[in-house]
Amino acid sequence: MFYLTKDDPELARLVRNEGNRLETTINLIAAENHSPASILEVMGSVFNTKTIEGYPGNRFHAGCIHVDEVENLAMTRGKRLFNAEHINVQPHSGTSANLAVYFSVLKTGDRILSMSLPHGGHLSHGHKASITSQCFDFYHYKVNYETERIDYDQVRKMARSIKPKMIVAGASSYPRLIDYEKMSQIAKEVSAFFLTDMAHLAGLVAAKLIPSPIPWSDFVTFTCYKTMMGGRGGVILCKNIFGKKIDKAVFPGCQGTSAVNLIAAKALIFKLALEEKFVFIQKKTLENAEIMARALMEKGYHVISCGTDNHQVLVDLTAKGISGKAAEDSLMAAGIILNRNVVPQDEKTSGKVSGIRLGSGAVSARGMGKPQMREIIKLMDMALMNQTKKEVIKKVKEHVLALCQAFPIKKAF
Ligand code: DSN
């Protein structure tokens, strides 16, 4: 931070403050993680300077000798890690990756069947606030309100009546495994393309701890900063037959120059993901989510679908009489960081956000395990049940700090 402190002490202070915030709070945001320091290093490297358009060996600017190697490395490593036929490492984000997939094989106005947002889907799966809904004609399947799991019969029924050109599997807040084989079968039955968005699950898939959607999907998109523990940015995997269309849809279709520093970070995390340490953290991530879900249910919380198969735990707070926002705020005051989240029942009460989403990635990367997960849930419950009692919140915060100090953020693998 030598140069930043010299050029802009105010900004340097903010960077230090953010580092301090991360060290002294418990991060349960399911869409975040702690990255190795080498990821931060390469994202801040000289590759930040280079403008690229096109693909390795066919660029629109000179001087790409080294970035061509970087992109080739990211592609080779990514394909090997996920056993994929074709890869594009240029998308700026998961949403950019999804947009490129839609535009690669669909025409504006075509029908797409994806998961409803309150039931777990993502904005870029055709939510009305997303530009995706203006470009394509989206229909949404839901979870069964009793089991709170995907109802595949309902998906099949909808697919047969709507006849979509594409079916999307994958979610932002769905704690259960998805049956990709079944979803791909449904897509085949109606001659639809099949896209899986595994943004949240990529690290668990890379570690081979949960089933991979890759053998079943025409296209798979993901981001690198959630369970994957890398830098920012998105990736598309697809079957070879779609490779040219995907590359054209990313550049020049949906994006101009891509971020070489982020492509370099992708190359790095695809290497680190093969290491034992990465797999160990992913195992802990799964175990820790399960422990948190159980501890919450023991305390009488409504855990969506009665548990979890991945890194997420979704809690409906309606019965506790606490809104998602109130829970998020009082937990933040106590040093526990998570996000309020819509839950399936919120579909019926437009605008209400009745839940919270917990993720186990970042705490697992810090080395926390079973005793710490049980302690975190105990502290969460104390904070939630005593939202207006300042002395209780202060006491919880002290415990949170002690926990954080015992498990500092690890800088390296
Ligand atoms: N998809 C959003 C989330 O899950 O929070 C951000 O990546």
Image: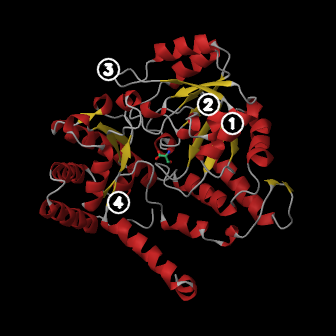
Evaluate if marks 1 and 2 touch, with contact meaning CB atoms under 8 Å apart. Answer: yes
Q: Which residue is mark 4?
A: 366
Q: Which residue is mark 3?
A: 146
Q: Which mark is residue 281?
A: none
Q: Secondary structure at mark 4?
A: loop
> Which residue lies at the image location 77% right of the left edge and 54% below the top edge?
256
> Which residue lies at the image location 28% right of the left edge and 65% below the top edge?
404
Q: CA distance from mark 4 to mark 2?
A: 33 Å
Q: Which-is-in-front pick, marks 4 and 2? A: 2
Give the mark nearest the N terminus, 4 or 2: 2
Does residue 257 appear anywhere in the picture?
Answer: yes
Question: Does residue 158 sit above or below 279 in this rendering?
Answer: above
Q: Hey, what amino acid is under mark 1?
A: Val
Question: Does residue 160 sit above or below 208 in this rendering?
Answer: above
Q: Secondary structure at mark 3?
A: loop
Q: Hey, what amino acid is under mark 2?
A: Leu
Give the mark nearest the N terminus, 1 or 4: 1
Q: Nearer the viewer, residue 211 or 339?
A: 339
Q: Which residue is mark 2?
A: 195
Residue 400 coordinates in the image, percent (x, y): 23, 62
Q: Which residue sits furthest front?
A: 350
